[in-house]
Amino acid sequence: MFAALGERNYRLFWSGSLLSNVGTWMQRVAQDWLVLELSNGSGLAVGITTALQFGPTLVLPGLSGLAADRFDKRFLLKLTQVWMAACALTLGILTIAGMAQVWHVYVLALLFGVGSAFDIPARQAFVSEVVGPEKLPNAIALNSAGFNVSRLIGPAVAGLVIHQFGSGWAILSNGFSYLAFIGGLLLMDGTRLFPTKRVARGKRQVRAALSYIRNRPDVMLILGILGFIGTFGLNFQMTSALMATEIYHQDAQGYGILGTIMAVGSLTGALIGARRRKAPRLRFFLVTAACFGIMLIVSGSMPTYLAFALSLPFMGLSSLLTMNAANTIVQMTVDPQLRGRVMAIYILVMQGGTPFGAPLLGWFAELWGARSTLWVGGGMVLIGELLVLLLLVRKLDVGLWQEIRPYAGRIIHPRRSSQEST
């Protein structure tokens, strides 16, 4: 379960990421809470902030993925950490000084998103250079475990800090947390890395990655479903904030606890994934994605704060198993020379829909209440999975099609199916 941690370089990478991610989760909670305070509880304002922060992944995947394939990934990660630290420190200082306004948050969220757009594909692709191919599935799962340990700690600490000192101090803490990851990168032994051959300058290099993906129906299936999940399902910070304040009338501490509770399920899913030695099969991904959509609907229907909190670990478990399966399948099966660009497109699909989905769900919240954000999100995940599956399943593994074909036939031709059964 912890094989990758036997590598010193990976221990430095993992521990630095853990501390940095704790700070990032603190800022996410504090930033949403700050926007609610500055905008008099506007769900639309929270959605716009989320959209601006994830918007750069929609327009920069070609540049960021190509940068990850062409340049030294460790050096690129140092630059992105410094950039994001500067954004966090600026917003934290403005908030503590009492000068922060909604437009300040919008601008800094956008700048933070630019740094994140370059950071994520480089970080994803760099993992294989830290541990090598044999331990890559375990390292991906342990990354998810560390990420969710930070999500377990970060929101709870943020709730306490916001309650005692205010949002600014939680955001400022994130600025300093990046020093941990930068330190880990500096201390790594370069001779024990597994560097991928860098891509030379050339024409149509982003187009080459798109052509590669089009010829991989299994990757197309994963990306199609992830598009719906990222657009409508992975808006936990916004939906939890709205549910906590509008439905259950909780304060900042109560909101922070929800993130911690959900992280329990996510951490469990990550540890389950860490036991795998090989990439999971597509069937596993399809099942967990459907379970995630169902859990969104179930959680949105919970009558009390306690019932809602108890449903969140199952939501976290299903979402993490889905994300971990998708990430592992893609990273283990793509051409290493294209990994940075493919992972940039992967992140684009998973996060690029958020600029559309978050404001849309925020608008639904203002029209029909906070519960609608989870009901609509879960419904769209299930509908999206079904549509993508019906479009691509004929191009996939024959065994998978043979298992699904009878059910697909009933959906496409219900009358013919009933006559044949008769």
Image: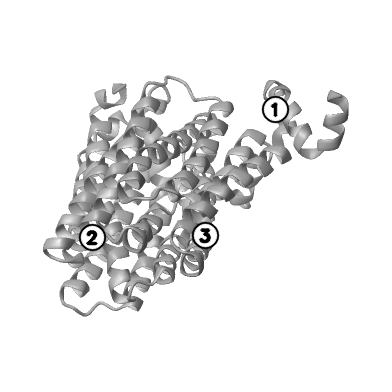
Q: Nearer the viewer, residue 389 or 349?
A: 389
User: Which residue is pictured at 47% across the width and 53% down the height?
Assistant: 374
Q: Position of residue 238 (x, y in %)?
A: 39, 59
Residue, disc 2: 252
Q: Nearer the viewer, mark 3 or mark 2?
A: 2
Spatial CA span between label 3 and label 2: 24 Å
42 over 386 or under it: above or below: below
Residue type, label 3? Gly
Q: Position of residue 88 (x, y in %)?
A: 25, 63
> Which quadrant, please, contains the C terminus?
top right
Q: Element type at marker 3?
A: helix
Q: Nearer the viewer, residue 266 or 379?
A: 379
Spatial CA span between label 1 and label 2: 46 Å
Residue type, label 2? Ala
Q: Position of residue 327 (x, y in %)?
A: 47, 36
Residue, disc 1: 404
Asked if the residue at tag 3 contacts the one at tag 1, i.e. Cβ–Cβ closer than 8 Å, the answer is no
Q: Element type at marker 1?
A: helix
Q: Nearer the viewer, residue 180 or 32?
A: 32
Dot 1 alpha-carbon crowd within 10 angstroms: few under 14, some 14 to 19, many 20 or more: few
